Amino acid sequence: MKKLLCLFLLFLGACTAEQQADVNLFFTSDIEGIFWSRPEPQYGNEEIGGLAVLKSFLDKQTTPFVLFDGGNWFSQTPEGNLTKGDYFNTVASSLPYTARLFTEKDLAYGWGSLSQILKQSPAPFVLSNVTLSNGKIPAGVRTWLVEDAKGIKIGVLGLVPQKSLRGKQRLGGLKILNEVETAQNTVSLLKEKGAQVIVLLSGLGESDDKEALTDILLAEEVPDIDIILSANLGREGTESSQVGKTLIIYPGSKLDSVAKVGLFFNKNKELSKVKLEDIVLYRRDFGQDAHVAELTEDLRRATRNQMGRSVGKIEQELTGNLQAESSLGNWAADCLRKWAKTDTAIINADSLRKDLPAGEVTQYDLYQLYPYTDHVTLLTMKGDALLNALEEGLNTVGHFAQISGVQIRYSLSAMPNKRIVGAWIKGKPISTKATYRVAVTDYMLSGGAGHDGFIDSLEFKNTQVEMRTVLRLCLAGKKQEQNYMQKRWSTVK
């Protein structure tokens, strides 16, 4: 599977798929600690992704290329978090990265930890607006870079948003300079150094905050940037937008794929066309590098040993289902509702990534079950808004709402948004005018997995407690003996 997008800069004409680019840019970002090959439901459970597959893919390239990483490389897994992100220095050292960026999430363990990763990184971090409080450039950091690829000079700068420091602990030694001013000065410098293409590694991304600086706003302020490689957005696949001549690339996350940006130049070595592809890293297509695969497995084995402590026991196997109610989903939703002490709780099926067999459950099992850092969020919702949110859940594919505290009857033959024919909480029909206390994750509140309706809440409070913590506390309690396959969703003709 390969998505192909043809995009143009300073060029009019047809997109010729057979024409080879003069130079390719490859970009990974938001790996989030999921750096191994694994079956993925959205790709028909084909085995995809991982640094070993990426290395094998790159080894097959015949066109000169430059490889970048945008950061957020450890946030979602024990393999990433136990090393505080240092796994990348070990496992990815065999890959030909030219430059790296860190994002706000990579500051989780403080500057002391991150500074060691920067210092020991096999590829430099290009951080144009990051300095120490004393004005010095941190070890392992370049403020700019000019990379020569087949005689084409590619100028690289990197920006971390100033807001990254807000509310963070143990960052007293770090200073982040104004993004626009830094970009303007660095772009001018890169042009003086002969750069024919200007590439920005950006942690700015997008924002719901109208006052926040985003990639789009920066492109308007600094129009001489040719390509912005945007990080820290967690997209499912490569996407793009354009501001003037500036192309903004948003890569996919979790190393399912790699963004490929083909650069074409005219006889004067001026950029004339850009072609963007989202290359899904199918193991069957590219194989995997044996050395990187061995390093990956060694690290995962060490993590499993460290995470082998039992956190509880279940008496029956719990299995998930992306398309319908499941015993695993019902159990997880019950755990959430009981912990939050709400009327109902709702989570999306795709967040539950591994079945739980009967018997002891380890800390590592929990990470595999719920490999995300979603936080529990408490909502107050009117009945009509709650019903609308549940209706929207019926329109999603692969993200069926797993529920607790509510029973629903629905018709698949009815028109969309009119499928629910009855809904009850504590045995009473949901009243459109009544208010209800609802527990979800912040991922669902933000519209994740197509569940957009929860934003229509009267009140919401992020507890800052991870969903995985709630599941661990649930397992540590009484034995799980309930039959979790009772019908909570039931269909009618």
Image: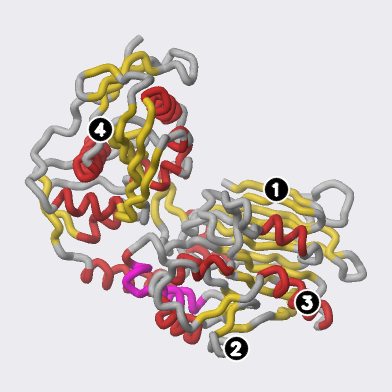
In the rendered structure, find residue 153 and report the number of the disc placed on it.
3
The rendered magenta stretch, by its main secondary structure, is classed as helix
- Select label 1 or label 2 by which is in front: 2
Camera-side residue: 438 or 361? 438
At x 60%, y 88%, the residue is 135
Q: Earlier in the sequence, mark 3 or mark 2?
A: 2
Image location (x, y in percent) of residue 191: 82, 77
- Select label 4 or label 3 by which is in front: 4
User: What SS does tag 3 mark?
Assistant: strand
In the rendered structure, find residue 135 and report the number of the disc placed on it.
2
Q: CA distance from mark 4 to mark 1?
A: 46 Å
- The residue that disc 4 covers is 343
Q: CA distance from mark 3 to mark 2?
A: 29 Å
Camera-side residue: 444 or 257? 444
- Which coloring applies here? secondary structure
The answer to whether residue 492 is seen in the rendering is yes
Query: Which amino acid type is shown beneath numbered disc 4?
Result: Asp
Q: Residues within 10 Å of mark 2 (few under 14, many from 20)?
A: few
Left-right relation of 154 to 129: right
Label 3 with label 1: CB-CB less than 8 Å: no
Q: Earlier in the sequence, mark 1 or mark 2?
A: 1
Q: Earlier in the sequence, mark 4 or mark 3?
A: 3
